Amino acid sequence: MFLTRLNIGTFNNLSLTPQELSHFRHFCYLKNTLVYTNNLKFLCIQSGICKLSYFHESREFVLCYITKGNIALLDEHVVVEVVENCEVLELSLYKFEELLENKEFSMSLFNQLIRAVLTQREFIKEMVFLGLNERLKRFLVNLSEFASDKFGVFEMKFNMTQLANLLNSTRQSVSTEFNKLLKSGFLVKVSPKFYRLASEK
């Protein structure tokens, strides 16, 4: 399965009884809403897109993007930003045990946590062993594989600040490396905000 922080995989439709659903809190959030929590809880995305970020001393690091079919574990350090209007189910950790008897839900949650760990390990490996130029290249390759059309063209929905938060760097450094990739021909600008990789012809 192709896993990146843009795509951590999804669960199948959950078969929950009305009694089991009563353990969840149901919310509809509008775009740009920020969601915080003081306690551990699970977030199940029913529709829309959210961004999970970790904040430390006013600096942001983007953990991943989650969409329909994703389950995420939140704590006091993680902030959820709604990228597209979304519908979510929230489950407090202390109510989690009551749902363990539901095999489908338990396996979906287990698989999501495994995927999250594997995705984060891959990024840790990149941070330790790769420079910014290679990390940016890998991100663009992943974005192309995940979001390009049949011609290999994809929309760059991230500005330089957002890319810096994804790659754990500064805006200036990312902007410099991005322009180098354009000049080298690795990345081709098709039109404003739309690009393709040089290999996609």
Image (cartoon, grey):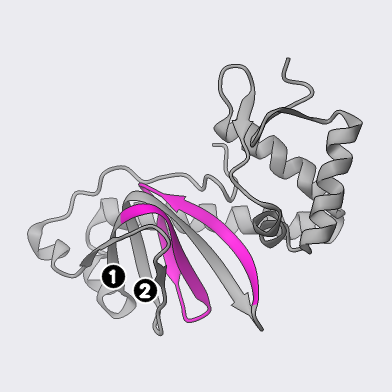
The quarter of the displayed image where residue 42 is located? bottom left
Provide residue 175's location: percent of width, then percent of height: 80, 52
Question: Dot 1 corresponds to which residue?
Answer: 91
Q: CA distance from mark 2 to mark 1?
A: 6 Å
Residue 120 is covered by the magenta coloring: no
**137 and 44: which is toward the camera:** 137
Mark 2, Cα crowd under 10 Å, few <14 / some 14-19 / many 20+, is some
Q: Residue at x 47, y 44 (%)?
A: 9
Q: Residue at x 73, y 63 (%)?
A: 168
In the image as oriented, which residue stretches furthest toward the left? 18
Provide residue 165's location: percent of width, then percent of height: 67, 62
Q: Residue at x 29, y 67 (%)?
A: 90
Question: Dot 2 corresponds to which residue?
Answer: 41
Provide residue 66's location: percent of width, then percent of height: 46, 53
**Tag 2–tag 1 contact (CB < 8 Å):** yes
Q: Secondary structure at mark 1?
A: strand
Relative horizontal placement of residue 120, taking residue 49 as reference (left or right): right
Start-end of magenta stretch = 59-86
Provide residue 56's location: percent of width, then percent of height: 64, 80
